[in-house]
Amino acid sequence: MALPRKSAFLRIDTPRNVHQVIPVLKVRKDDTMHVAICSPRVWGYATHWDGKRTIRCTLGTGTCICKSGQMPTRDKGFVLVANGAGQLLGFLELTPMAWHELQALSTNIDGLRGKVVKVFRQYGSMKGRLMVEPWGEYQGTHPLPKDRDPEPTLRRIHGLPDLD
Ligand SMILES: [Zn+2]
């Protein structure tokens, strides 16, 4: 399994003011990565596009911009991923379609951990569909990192206060 070259094809949103930085990884055009999935299942969030960037829907806390009007919502999925040596890479951001394709690789809802997938953009462009293909099982000697909830990372990226 090739080690991903992070700087070559991933835009990394780094949380501010955080001791343990877990980057959010977005697959860019013209490259391919193979990652081992650490999460048992995809973490899913509703998001909005505010004209500049994707922000998480925070309607559950009563403060989301979608409350004030019609605001399209787009689901995004995240899975914690590692490289072939079992080193933590970050949260891989998935489109709704890639999310469902990835989740479909597991016959039970919590069966994704340990699967290796190839991710890339179809047609080599940012507008190309994000593709997820099965690539076997993780065979590294180190145990995969334990799963983490992406919520604290996403809240920091979006400038929201930490939850208790
Ligand atoms: Zn919202």
Image (cartoon, rainbow, N blue to C red):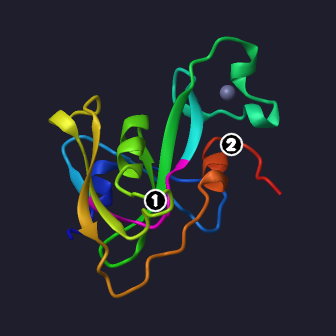
- Left/right placement of residue 79 relative to residue 124 reads right
Q: Which residues are magenta?
A: 34-43
Which quadrant holds the N terminus? bottom left
As shown in the figure, which amino acid type bears the numbered disc 2? Gly
User: What residue is shown at x 66% (from left), y 33% (from top)?
Assistant: 57
The verdict on label 2 being within 8 Å of ligand 1 is no
As shown in the figure, which amino acid type bears the numbered disc 1? Asn
Q: CA distance from mark 1 to mark 2?
A: 35 Å
- The image quadrant where one finds ligand 1 is top right
Which mark lies nearer to you, 1 or 2? 1
Residue 108 - label: 1
User: Residue 4: x and y, percent?
Assistant: 27, 63
Query: Which residue matches tag 2?
Result: 159
Residue furthest bottom in the image: 141
User: What residue is shown at x 29% (from left), y 80% (from top)?
Assistant: 139
Disc 1: CA contacts within 10 A as few (<14), some (14-19) or many (>=20) = few
Say which of 65 and 10 sits in front: 65
Say which of 126 and 110 sits in front: 110
User: Residue 6: x and y, percent?
Assistant: 32, 59
